[in-house]
Image: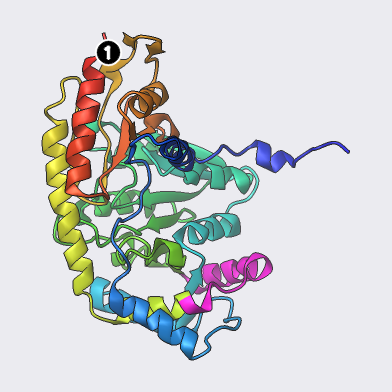
């Protein structure tokens, strides 16, 4: 028997973030003290009132299949959240809940994109976007942005990237991997471009909505003239420290929701029933926990930016959201230490892991080979020690 996998899998790459996390876990298992800054996961526990809702759901036997798009109670809680926090009007029929925001993004791409369709992806980008487009037989079209422009694209760049084959654009704000946040004014300028191209759908990944340091969240859906072409992606993983509960959702025009519902009904059906009940409490319950965690992330942002700016050779911006720092590190390319030669950001990330014992992720995987990503979703002590190790390791390169 030939061990032959489908051509579809041949188009995909392995997630760089998960691969680096696995490598760091292997070194930890060998007894090496590794500080893992590779994974985008809050280090907080799920708040007690949300855990209690999950426990109550188990005791009340919410253990059967749910409707494919999610329980009515959860969908109503999401509708309430969107109105209360975002000033957006949606109906429950415009909501579909999935096994995490990652599935939500993939659902939308698989439902909208066909062979030869182009999807615009601003770079730096989250590692899975291009592969999801390839999985749908589409073509990723990248718009590069640099640290000098705070990793945000301009209206002129967007206009130049749109063709008659453009089906969608994916906008992530606050951004993974850069932490950049589009303001209302910046989104409005992009909206004005998109209004001239009526067949382009906006996939707005807003999973980091509540982890922002600018005081308010702006969404492309806030503009009435384009709202019927916007798909909001969100969930509970980041804001409520519920990564393992696996609940994400889309808020979208009903025809898109129906398409995603048809797709999801064939390969996963509804998400975990217990998780849905916990997520309902997360959206509808006390929100003080969200602000407490946001304040902690902001303090850590200030700390890591301050310390990283003190490292010669790294160029750093001041991210306005999420929990990532994306320093420019290309000044180290061509340098050496012992058997290590730094030719690119992946080499640098591996060097920092094996010599500095800090796990980061090279920028190649995010479409920005001149940078690397660090997650500061860890303690102040870990941040301080990690940057000390990185500074020492980089000083050895000549």
**Mark 1 sits on what residue?**
397
**Is residue 221 on the magenta stretch?**
no
Residue drawn at x 18%, y 30% is 388
Looking at this view, is 104 or 353 the one in front?
353
Considering every residue shown, the one lying at the far front of the view is 31
Q: Answer left or right for 390 relative to 66.
A: left
In this view of the protein, can residue 165 be seen by the observer? no
Looking at this view, is 72 or 300 the one in front?
300
Write down the quadrant of residue 375 in the picture: top left
Q: Whole-percent x and y of residue 137?
A: 64, 44
Q: Whole-percent x and y of residue 266?
A: 68, 68
Residues drawn in magenta: 252-274
Q: Is residue 34 above or below residue 180?
A: above
Q: Is residue 285 above or below residue 187?
A: below
- What crowding class fits label 1: few (fewer than 14 Cα within 10 Å), some (14-19), or many (20 or more)? some
In this view of the protein, can residue 319 be seen by the observer? yes
Write down the quadrant of residue 350 in the picture: top left
Write down the quadrant of residue 10 in the picture: top right
Q: Secondary structure at mark 1?
A: loop
Residue drawn at x 15%, y 38% is 305
Q: Whole-percent x and y of residue 245?
A: 44, 67
Q: Main secondary structure of the magenta part?
A: helix
Image quarter where the C terminus lies is top left
Residue drawn at x 61%, y 67% is 264
Q: Is residue 288 above or below residue 324?
A: below
**Is residue 272 on the magenta stretch?**
yes
Looking at this view, is 168 or 131 the one in front?
131
């Amino acid at each position: 028997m030939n061990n032959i996998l489908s051509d579809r899998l041949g188009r995909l790459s392995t997630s760089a973030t998960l691969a680096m996390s696995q490598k760091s876990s292997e070194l930890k298992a060998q007894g090496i003290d590794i500080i893992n800054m590779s994974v985008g996961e809050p280090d907080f526990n799920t708040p007690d009132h949300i855990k209690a809702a999950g426990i109550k759901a188990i005791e009340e036997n919410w253990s059967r299949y749910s409707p494919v798009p999610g329980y009515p109670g959860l969908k109503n809680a999401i509708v309430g959240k969107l109105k209360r926090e975002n000033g957006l009007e949606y109906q429950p029929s415009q909501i579909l809940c999935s096994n995490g925001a990652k599935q939500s993004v993939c659902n939308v791409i698989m439902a909208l994109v066909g062979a030869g369709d182009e999807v615009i992806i601003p770079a730096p980008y989250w590692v899975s976007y291009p592969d999801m487009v390839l999985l749908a037989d589409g073509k990723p079209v990248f718009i590069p942005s640099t640290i000098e422009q705070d990793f945000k694209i301009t209206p002129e760049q967007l206009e130049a990237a749109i063709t008659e084959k453009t089906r969608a654009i994916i906008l992530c704000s606050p951004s993974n991997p850069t932490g950049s946040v589009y303001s209302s004014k910046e989104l409005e300028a992009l909206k004005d471009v998109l209004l001239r191209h009526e067949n382009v759908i906006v996939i707005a990944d807003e999973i980091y909505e509540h982890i922002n340091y600018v005081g308010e969240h702006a969404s492309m859906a806030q503009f009435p003239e384009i709202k019927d072409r916007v798909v909001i992606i969100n969930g509970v993983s980041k804001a409520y420290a519920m990564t393992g509960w696996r609940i994400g959702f889309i808020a979208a025009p009903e025809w898109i929701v129906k398409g995603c519902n048809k797709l999801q009904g064939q390969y996963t059906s509804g998400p975990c029933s217990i998780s849905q009940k916990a997520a309902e409490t997360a959206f509808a319950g006390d929100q003080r926990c969200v602000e407490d965690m946001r304040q902690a992330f902001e303090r850590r942002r200030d700390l890591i930016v301050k310390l990283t700016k003190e490292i010669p050779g790294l160029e750093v911006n001041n991210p306005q959201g999420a929990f990532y720092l994306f320093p420019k590190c290309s000044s180290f390319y061509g340098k050496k230490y012992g058997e290590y030669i730094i030719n690119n950001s992946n080499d640098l990330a591996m060097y920092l892991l094996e010599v500095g014992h800090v796990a980061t992720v090279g920028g190649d995987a995010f479409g920005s080979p001149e940078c690397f990503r660090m997650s500061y979703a860890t303690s102040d002590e870990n941040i301080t020690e990690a940057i000390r190790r990185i500074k020492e390791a980089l000083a050895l390169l000549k």
